[in-house]
Image: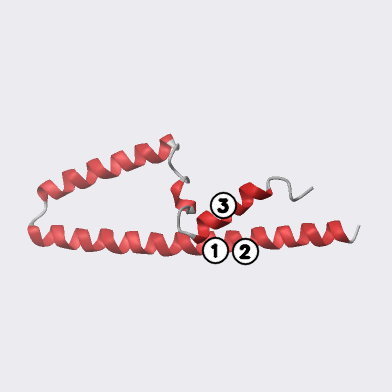
Amino acid sequence: MWLQGGDEMKNIIEELWNGERGPQDTLVDNNPHYKKLQQRQSRNKTELLEILSEEQKEKLEKYCDTTLEMNSVSEREAFTAGFKIAMRLAAEAFYTADNE
């Protein structure tokens, strides 16, 4: 029973391996709240850049770059932890099913 959809699973695994699919690809694509936040962030940054000196702009860019890097690390760690939990759940489900 757990093999149903096996071809689809194989395709997903191959896509992950080949770098064709990542969890970040679809996480927020259709999230209207996220899109509003993106627009607000862009507007606020544009307004801020208009009043900052060149030195302040450089510091802001460094800050933004560091924030993006931190978010990337955090997202990767969250994905890894979630994947491990999912695999443990799957292993437990198969083990339990085999022993019943």
Q: Amino acid at mark 1?
A: Thr
Q: SS at mark 3?
A: helix
Q: SS at mark 1?
A: helix
Per the image, the residue denoted by label 3 is 12
The vertical placement of 19 against 34, above or below, is: below
In the image, which disc is placed on residue 80?
Answer: 1
Q: Is residue 58 left or right of residue 27?
A: left
**Identity of the residue drawn at 35% across and 63% down:** 69
Distance between the alpha carbons at the discs numbered 2 and 1:
6 Å
Q: Amino acid at mark 2?
A: Lys
Work out whether residue 34 or residue 48 is closer to the camera in this orientation and state it.
34
**Identity of the residue drawn at 33% across and 60% down:** 67
Task: Indicate the position of residue 32 as horizontal and vertical percent values.
Answer: 42, 34
In the image, which disc is placed on residue 70?
Answer: none
Mark 2 is surrounded, within 10 Å at the Cα level, by few (under 14), some (14 to 19) or many (20 or more) other residues, namely few
Task: Indicate the position of residue 23 as horizontal and vertical percent values.
Answer: 49, 52
In the image, which disc is placed on residue 84?
Answer: 2
